[in-house]
Image (cartoon, rainbow, N blue to C red):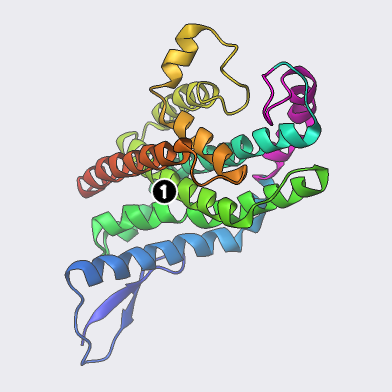
Amino acid sequence: MSTRTDLTGDRATPVTEGADAVPRTGVAKFVGDTWAVFTREILLVLRDPFTLIFSLLQPLIFLGLFGPLLTGAVGGFGGGAPGGGGSTADTLQWFVPGVIVMISLFGTSMSGSNLLYEMMTGSYERVLATPLDRSAILVGRSLKEFAPLVVQGLLIALVCVPFGFTLHPLHLLVGLLLLGLFGVGVGALSIALALAAKNREWLFWGVQQSLLFPLLILSGMMLPLEAGPAWMRTAALFNPLTYVVDAERALLAGSFTDPDVLWGFVAAAVTCAVGLWVGIRRTRRTV
């Protein structure tokens, strides 16, 4: 008789399998363990949907208050030069992709905060005591960020349609997949930072906040960088988020062939690979 670990709740409990069950190894074990961790994490979100709903308030505030300022000050994103004035529809077409990326960045960069709470309560140590693959623990937790992102991105886009935003469903789906790839990498880096900052929560928040807003501003997410100083435009070239934002704008404008889309996927893939590499190494070293 063999046992496996059920992680669908807050606690890890053994579940007895049949005597003829074959222990999983290799890729099968990794996939199964990843699914177990993902299921546990997503059920925690579903049990507390208020957090998901509350996280939509900030982007809606940005759309409601920041959007009109952009329309009057730096409108004309539909083809005109920034500063030339433009319609609300043009501004939304430019601004909504940035807001959806902001949701992804804020949500995934906070992955480590949830882990810090679990380490304080001892829940994470119980997970480590199970026979789960350490890599699967990190990948499963990182993938959990993708599901809420899809829901939030769709809601933001649908809310803006009555105000002139043109929705391209297939392009939006590809854009969300791009953000999912990018978000897994950011989430893994956030988890790695939380593990490194164990018992020093101030370190996690200090690093996270110090990196979050410069990355946001230097990506052109909220304001175009064309009118900024040369050093900001140069710094933006080294910011992977810049390429993700440009790709999202091209996709949500209805284009698959824009070169920005390719560069966005390259930046997201590199971020994902680096994040998983760093996160897996840190997770395996956790005791």
Relative horizontal placement of residue 194, taking residue 86 as reference (left or right)? left
Mark 1: which amino acid?
Leu
Let me know if residue 123 appears in the view. Answer: no
Q: Which residue is mark 1?
A: 181
Say whether residue 244 is magenta.
no
Q: Secondary structure beneath disc 1?
A: helix
Quarter of the image for residue 67 reads top right
Q: Nearer the viewer, residue 121 or 133?
A: 133
Residue 2 spot, x, y in % from top left: 22, 83
Q: Is residue 242 above or below residue 2?
A: above
- Magenta-colored span: 55-82
* Residue found 67% across the figure and 19% down from its top: 81
Name the image quarter holding residue 111. Answer: top left
Q: Nearer the viewer, residue 260 or 144?
A: 260
**In screen coordinates, is 232 left or right of 140?**
right
- Residue at the location (61% across, 58% down)? 48
Assign the N terminus to one quadrant of the image: bottom left
* Picture layout, residue 11 above or below residue 280: below
Query: For this rendering, which residue is in front, 1 or 270?
Result: 270
Which residue lies at the image location 58% right of the left edge and 63% below the top edge? 46
Q: Position of residue 199 (x, y in %)?
A: 36, 35
Judged left or right of residue 67, residue 118 is left
Which residue is pictured at 53% across the width and 48% down the height?
175
Q: Position of residue 271 (x, y in %)?
A: 35, 39
Reply yes or no: does residue 74 show up in magenta: yes
